[in-house]
Image: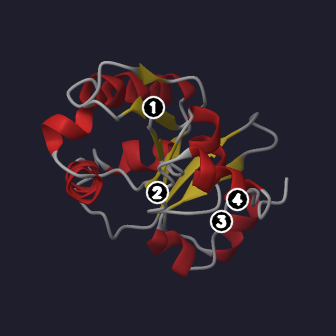
């Protein structure tokens, strides 16, 4: 079997950005109690102004007076993952949402339908980008390997157990 791992590192922010009219407007996702509001994620425009994830809202507002804020909504992430899983079922009958911000798809049989991996990968990337989701995609012989490698690589494809056994010795845990 071959498994593709689609890692969506900024899923919450991407979900909010999909609904915005101006993608260049500085935006921060915020969370926390009323006494301790924290920036969860920031878009590139906000980052260019000096805002960063983990920063307190008070510090961010002292640094930049004019940026948009949206409450971080964990339920929105769940809805987005379900949406993306439904999309992934168009490519594979075996889709998993076992890990947060990750789609795992068994793709070996899908290659017969969608072409060799480079063609299939390009299609996945094109569709994810068109939907507004930043992503990393890795293929490995099992879902755990694919998930682990997606933390370190984008575009990596290890298609046999022998290659995986060589690769795993070069990965620090």
The disc at residue 166 is 4
Residue with the mark numbered 2: 157
Give the SS element for disc 1. Answer: loop
Q: Is residue 45 visible?
A: yes
Residue drawn at x 42%, y 28% is 81
Q: Is residue 57 visible?
A: no
Task: State the CA–CA distance, disc 2 to disc 1.
Answer: 13 Å
Residue depicted at 60% across the width and 56% down the height: 163
- Residue for badge 1: 1
Q: Give me the C-alpha separation between circle 2 and circle 3.
A: 43 Å
Residue 111 horizontal/vertical position (percent): 24, 40
Answer yes or no: do the residues labelled 2 and 4 have beta carbons within 8 Å? Answer: no
Label 4: few (<14), some (14–19) or many (≥20) C-alpha neighbours in 10 Å: few
Q: Secondary structure at mark 4?
A: helix
Label 2: element kind: loop
Badge 3 local density, few (<14 within 10 Å), some, or many (20+)? few
Kindly report the distance in space between the C-alpha atoms of the residues bearing marks 1 and 4: 18 Å
The residue closer to the viewer here, 79 or 110, is 110
Circles 2 and 1: CB distance less than 8 Å?
no
Percent of width and height locating residue 148? 66, 46
Rendered location of residue 144, percent (x, y): 64, 35
């Amino acid at each position: 079997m071959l498994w593709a791992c689609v890692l969506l590192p900024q899923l919450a922010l991407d979900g909010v950005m999909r609904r915005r009219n101006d993608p260049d407007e500085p935006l921060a996702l915020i969370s926390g109690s009323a006494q301790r509001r924290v920036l969860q994620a920031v878009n590139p425009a906000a980052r260019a102004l000096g805002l960063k994830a983990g920063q307190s809202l008070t510090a961010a507002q002292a640094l930049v007076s004019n940026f948009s804020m949206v409450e971080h909504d964990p339920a929105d992430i769940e809805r987005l993952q379900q949406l993306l899983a439904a999309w992934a079922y168009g490519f594979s009958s075996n889709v998993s949402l076992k890990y947060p911000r990750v789609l795992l798809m068994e793709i070996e049989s899908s290659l017969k339908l969608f072409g060799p991996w480079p063609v299939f990968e390009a299609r996945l990337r094109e569709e994810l980008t068109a939907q507004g989701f930043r992503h990393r995609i890795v293929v490995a012989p099992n879902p755990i390997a694919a998930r682990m490698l997606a933390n370190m690589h984008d575009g990596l494809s290890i298609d046999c157990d022998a290659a995986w056994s060589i690769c795993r010795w070069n990965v620090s845990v």
